[in-house]
Image (tube, rainbow, N blue to C red):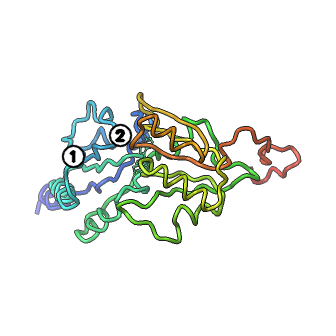
Amino acid sequence: MTVQDSTISQPPSHPVVFLGAGPGDPELITLKGRRLLDQADLIIYAGSLVNKELLTGVQGECFDSAGMDLEQILKHIIAGYRKGQKVVRLHTGDPAIYGAIREQMQWLDKEEIPYEVVPGVSSAFATAATLKKELTVPEVTQTVILTRQAGRTPVPERESLRNLAAAQATMCIFLSVSMMDKVAADLIDGGYTPETPVAVVEKASWPEEKKLTGTLANIDEKIKASGIKKTAMIIVGPALDMESTIASKLYDTKFKHEYR
Ligand code: SAH
């Protein structure tokens, strides 16, 4: 056997990449993500939320997965991989959050196809940036909860918004703006006061981004008046209150510096 023959019989060597596209702004993708997109032969992107500007100038073939079911998506990925192509599955934000990558990875495991995951900027953090807020404020809250209202996808009762509200932490609520009335009612029932600050950002980091602020008592009315229906992040909690005068202990000169 010649060296060339043995090279040909090698299995394809490019792991499939699950890639976080970031929240929308094409500059909010990692350098690694940008390189992988530019080098890809096949890109299957979640067209409902991924900014197509990210695909401008790429050499690879691009397919929108919006109209495909899981099997169709996987067939595409696997066919590309078996041809030796560099395959990128492009997800909005960070793929670990409501990305439905678990079932795709399980399928690839069964087929013994290697893959890697490259993180992205989640819309939760793009929203915090738009709002210019820190989600963790000493002596107010040191916890951020990423969650959603139950919809077609059920949420276990122990982590219903009402139960989570008891912690009085900062909550980033995905996939729920169309149910704002119920979200606000559940959060108040669970323990937040009606005066708790809330912010909603639609299409954070996109040119058409819209932002609204209010309290749990009035946010639903404001959302209805604004016409915001989807692709919006709700952030709620006392950390949003900029009136609070509590300064971060970390920069207090009396605080030990070892853990900075
Ligand atoms: N993996 C994504 C979330 C996908 S679920 C991430 O990490 O951001 C889809 C939900 O994410 C939307 O319903 C909305 O709540 C939120 N979302 C996605 N992109 C957004 C954006 N640019 N601005 C505000 N919310 C966004």
Q: Position of residue 231 (x, y in %)?
A: 40, 43
Q: Position of residue 37 (x, y in %)?
A: 31, 41
Q: Quadrant of the N terminus?
A: bottom left
Task: Give the vertical position of 3 relative to 129 (above or below).
Answer: below
User: Relative to the observer, which residue lies in front, 47 or 6?
Assistant: 47
Q: Position of residue 127 (x, y in %)?
A: 52, 40
Q: Position of residue 126 (x, y in %)?
A: 50, 40
Residue with the mark numbered 2:
35
Question: Residue 26 sits in which quadrant?
Answer: top left
CA separation, marks 2 and 1? 14 Å
User: Relative to the observer, which residue lies in front, 67 or 54?
Assistant: 67
Which residue lies at the image location 40% right of the left edge and 37% below the top edge? 24
User: Relative to the observer, which residue lies in front, 217 or 196?
Assistant: 217
Would residue 144 be found to the left or right of residue 117 on screen? right
User: Looking at this rendering, what residue extends furthest in the top direction?
Assistant: 207
Which disc, if any, is residue 216?
Answer: none
Residue with the mark numbered 1:
42
Q: What's the residue type where badge 2 is placed? A: Arg
Would residue 164 be found to the left or right of residue 61 on screen? right
Q: What's the residue type where badge 1 is placed? A: Leu
Which residue lies at the image location 51% right of the left edge and 41% below the top edge? 221
Local SS, label 2:
helix
